[in-house]
Amino acid sequence: MVGFLWPFIFLGQETIPKNQWFFWVSTPLALFVMIAEISSKRLDAKSVALLGVLAAFMAALRPLGAGAGGIEPMWFILIISARVFGSSFGFVLGILAMLTSAFITGGLGPWLGYQAFAAGWIGFLAGALPHTFFGKHVTRKLEIALLALYGVVAGLLFGILMDLQFWPWALGGGTALSFDTHLDLFHNLQRFIVFHFATSMAWDIPRAVLTASLILATAPTFLHALERTKRRASFLTPIVFKAGTETITERGK
C-alpha cells in the first residue's frame, strides 16, 4: 500500500519520488506473487488453468467499455470468482487480468502497476467477505446482495486508488488542489478529497453501478457454475483417511 499512499508519507521533503519506480518494481513483484502462489501449491494445475481462463475473459471484457464513463464490465467476474475460490485466488486473478489486458490493448505505462495491485486488492477483499453472520451461514440471496454492495465499494475504491497515483502530477504546483509536500497531512488529504470528488465521480459512479448490476444479474448462475466447477475439479485439499496401514484419499466428485 506504500505505492498508493506515498503522497502522504513523503511530506516535508524537498524532493519526492517519481511514480515510475512503482511500475518497474511492482510489475515483476506481481509476477513473483503468482509464481509463489503456484509454487506453494495453494494453486494447483487445475486452479492455474481456470485462473488463465477467467483472466482472459476479464481481459477481453475490459476493452468493451474502453474506460468510457467508467464502463468496465470486468469487475463482476473478479468479485464473484474471488468469492468462490478465496482471497489468494482473487488477488492473483486481479493482477493477472490487468497485466493481460495491458498487453492486449497496449496500455503499458507507469499506471499499470497501480492498476494491477488495485485489482489484486479488490479481488483479495472480495475473497475475504464473511460466509457467516452471527454464527449463521449466509443465504444465497444475502450473499448476492453482499457481493453487489461490495461491487459498489470496489468501483469507488478503484477510482480512489487510481487518483492517488494521478493527483500528485495532474495539476502541477501552485493551485488550490495541488499536492504540496510543504503542507501537513490534513491539508493534503483535504485537497485530494476535493480533487477526487471534482474529477472522478463521473467515472466512479457508473463503474460502481454497472458492477453491482452485473453481479445482481449474473451471480445466481455464475456462483453456481463456479461452485460446481470447484467441487468437480477438486480444487480443495484432498481429504485423507488412514485405516491401519492403508491410506484412502477422497476427492470431491
Image (cartoon, rainbow, N blue to C red):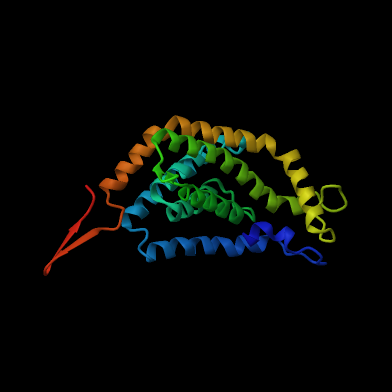
Q: Position of residue 242 (x, y in %)?
A: 16, 65
In the image, what residue occupies the spot 27% across and 49% down? 233
Residue 100 appears in the figure: no
Tell which of 105 and 39 is nearer to you: 39
Q: Is residue 68 left or right of residue 141?
A: right
In the image, what residue occupies the spot 48% across and 62% down? 33
Q: Is residue 82 left or right of residue 9?
A: left
Question: Furthest-right residue in view?
Answer: 174
Instruction: Please state the total of marks drawn on the protein image.
Output: 0
Q: Position of residue 245 (x, y in %)?
A: 11, 70
In the image, what residue occupies the spot 82% across and 57% down? 180
Image quarter in which the N terminus is found: bottom right
Tell which of 18 and 94 is nearer to you: 94
Q: Is residue 23 above or below residue 131?
A: below
Question: Furthest-left residue in view?
Answer: 245
Q: Is residue 18 above or below residue 162?
A: below
Q: Position of residue 170 (x, y in %)?
A: 76, 49
Question: Furthest-bottom residue in view?
Answer: 245
Q: Is residue 171 left or right of residue 104?
A: right
Among the 4 quarters of the image, the one containing residue 36: bottom left
Q: Position of residue 23 (x, y in %)?
A: 61, 60
